[in-house]
Amino acid sequence: MAGVGGGAGGSGWTWRPVARDPLLARAFHSCTELRGRFYLVGGLLAGGAREPSSDTVVFDPARGQAVQVRAPGGPRRSHHDAAPVGGRWLCVVGGWDGSRRLATVAALDTEQGVWEVWNAAPGNRPPAGLSSHTCTSLSDRELRVAGREGGTRTQRRYGSIYTLRLDPGARTYCYKEEGCHTVSRSGHCAALLRIPGPQPGHQLLLFGGCNSAEPEVVGRWSHGKIKEEPPVAPCLMEQLARLVSRGQGSRQGPRGLRHHSCSVVGPFAVLFGGETLTRARDTICNDLYIYDTRTSPSLWFHFPCADHGLKRVGHRTCLWNDQLYLVGGFGEDGQTASAQVCILDLFV
């Protein structure tokens, strides 16, 4: 057991190790579930590394095994994001290649085992460059991209919102700026959640990446505009509901947090770890935050942890088979990448 956080009275939480492999030791990578496997792309293999990795690793959570994908042409990336497309392609969007911030798209054909460079379609209006941004799937071929843009010498004080349309048949992509801006965010997370109340729908929220505890709404869709996904984690949803109902977590959101993880579990956004935007000596966190949208207004629940072995930054979480997995990230020293895969256990 990696450690226990939360309150007293028999309720709490922990990250329980289920696998360990040196291939998984990295941070600021992407980790995407596709057909029951986790695809890890790129990242930094050690703190202070200047060149991101170009390798791809597949982790099978059912077997607890990791293998390296022997596909040439893998993108050298960190601080990027990725999304599955068509149940076949893994599309890597933007990121840092060791010398510049990119907005291009590279795709792994998981059936053929080859990397493809997709081309910009006519009318493409890309960002100046993206890193530590987010890509949220709105449909099987449409992503919503959010985050601070700019090159290595210029940083805008705001971030534009883009729709990224992907065409696997033509091997093309096309950015469209939505005409709205966010506050300057970098290292934030995004969650597509249902809107509670008499007028159902969906909203896209951004958490962290700036010195604020308040989430920012960067998109709203009425009922039916977003493809409905059935609950995939009924047991975990029930456990989260019981945990927040105990009243032992503080009603406090994560203020000034970046490079944390976020996964949507039904009506809950589950955030973990990250780095605080403070001048404190110890900036890497190990706290669990739950954003509960079942009521209006939505509520924050904060469950701290005293175990320094759980501190993570630049990590990822993935939901699969009614369980939430923690993969990679730097530990307490901000230098050593974790080779463990853990599962979130809730004691309620």
Image (cartoon, rainbow, N blue to C red):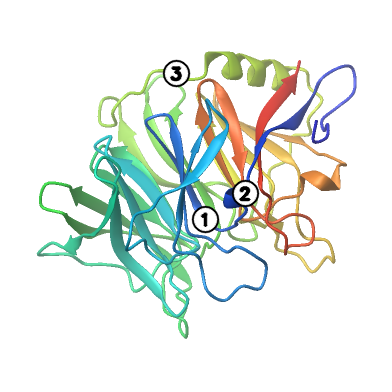
Q: Tell me the distance, in whole angstroms, between the alpha carbons under discs 1 and 2.
A: 8 Å
The 10 Å Cα crowd at callout 1, few under 14, some 14 to 19, many 20 or more, is many
Q: Tell me the distance, in whole angstroms, between the alpha carbons under discs 2 and 3.
A: 26 Å
Residue drawn at the location 36% of the way across and 70% of the way down: 102
**Dot 3 amino acid type:** Pro
Q: Is residue 318 left or right of residue 71?
A: right
Q: Tell me the distance, in whole angstroms, between the alpha carbons under discs 1 and 3.
A: 27 Å
Residue drawn at the location 65% of the way across and 33% of the way down: 290
Q: Earlier in the sequence, mark 1 or mark 3?
A: 1
Residue drawn at the location 61% of the way across and 73% of the way down: 49
Residue drawn at the location 45% of the way across and 21% of the way down: 197
Residue 261 image-quadrant placement = top right
Residue 209 image-quadrant placement = bottom right
* Disc 2: which residue: 328
Residue 4, position as x, y percentages in the image: 83, 31
Residue 165, position as x, y percentages in the image: 21, 50
**Dot 1 amino acid type:** His
The 10 Å Cα crowd at callout 2, few under 14, some 14 to 19, many 20 or more, is many
Mark 1 vs 2: CB contact within 8 A:
yes
Secondary structure at badge 1 equals: loop
> Considering depth in this image, is 115 or 348 the residue closer to the camera?
115
* Disc 1: which residue: 29
